[in-house]
Image: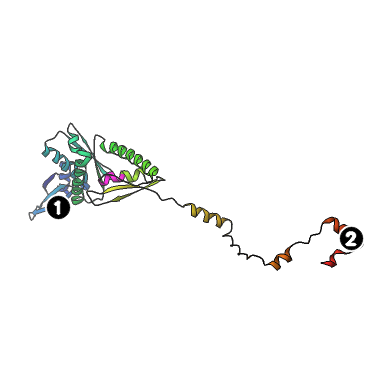
Amino acid sequence: MKSIEITANSYAEALKQALEELGLDESQVEAEKIKETGLIRKKVTVKVTQKVSGATLVNDFINGIIQRMGIKCEATVEEKEDAFYISLSGDDTGVLIGYRGDVLDSLQYLSLLVVNKDNPMGKRLVIDGENYRAKRIATLSKLAKKIAFRVAKNRKAESLEPMNPFERRIIHSALHDDRFVTTESHGEEPNRYVVIAPKKPSFDKRDRNNEGRERRGGDRPARPKQSAPSNQQAQEKEPRNFNKTGVTRMKSYGGDMKKFF
């Protein structure tokens, strides 16, 4: 962070000289009038300080930690609209990655605190080294799909080992559109873990039968129970024992059979 004091005949002249010396424009600095002397020929002293950007804060913080640790590594900061992207490179990059990225995540968290404290811009911050993040995403996505296949086949939920928020998001994202399983996070930090469970079927056999009845127009009415017919009813319903030959013979004599019944 650069700072300079310039004395000139006016505030505007002092500010102009300071910007030229710092090689910055007015939007990149903060200026304040320190003092004003003289009655006839006034002199104005202006202090001009370079504004500290989020990228500058992150760069100074991370590289300062690396130097104090005495490891051979360097951080390069790139500021974009959505986030700060920091890339680590050097012989000792693996030391800053740590076991499953635990050192990398801790460094990322501390850096984010520094940025939000002195330059609250609401941006994300991502630190990566030797393309570790992309490799970890590929590994965990493959693991998630493998376990999801086993869960869907056995219809039995499985719990994964505790993971940090970055790794849990990878699991949830990998199985977000899966038709057969669902994911949920359980537990408390730092032992929070992901559970992969089979999705419940949308309907069972009984639901299918009910759906079929509705399509046919509802349930069929139950048939009323019929009691056994009495002897008299059975005799009345019993058909007359006339054959076609007898009826024809009687009609040939001019008789009308209907009047006998």
Quadrant (top left/top right/bottom left/bottom right) for the C terminus: bottom right
* Relative side of 129 to 41, left or right: right
Amino acid type for the residue under numbered disc 1 = Glu
Residue 81 in sight: no
**Which residue is disc 1 drawn over?**
32
For label 1, count other residues whose C-alpha is less than 10 Å away and answer few (under 14), some (14-19) or many (20+).
few
Q: CA distance from mark 2 to mark 1?
A: 136 Å
Please name the residue shown 84% across and 67% down the image: 260
Q: Name the N-terminal-most of marks 2 and 1.
A: 1
From the image, which quarter does the N terminus lie in? top left
Q: What residue is drawn where x is 87% and y is 57%? A: 248
Q: Is residue 258 visible?
A: yes
Image x and y of residue 116, in percent: 21, 50
- SS for callout 2: helix
Q: Secondary structure at mark 1?
A: strand
- Residue lying farthest right? 253
State the residue position of label 2: 251
Image label count: 2
Residue visible at 38% across and 41% down?
149
What is the x, y in percent for residue 227?
Answer: 63, 66
In this view, the residue farthest toward the left is: 38
The range drawn in magenta is 161-169
Picture coordinates of residue 33, whole percent (x, y): 13, 53
Instruction: Compare residues 139 and 73 and report the one nearer the observer.
Output: 139
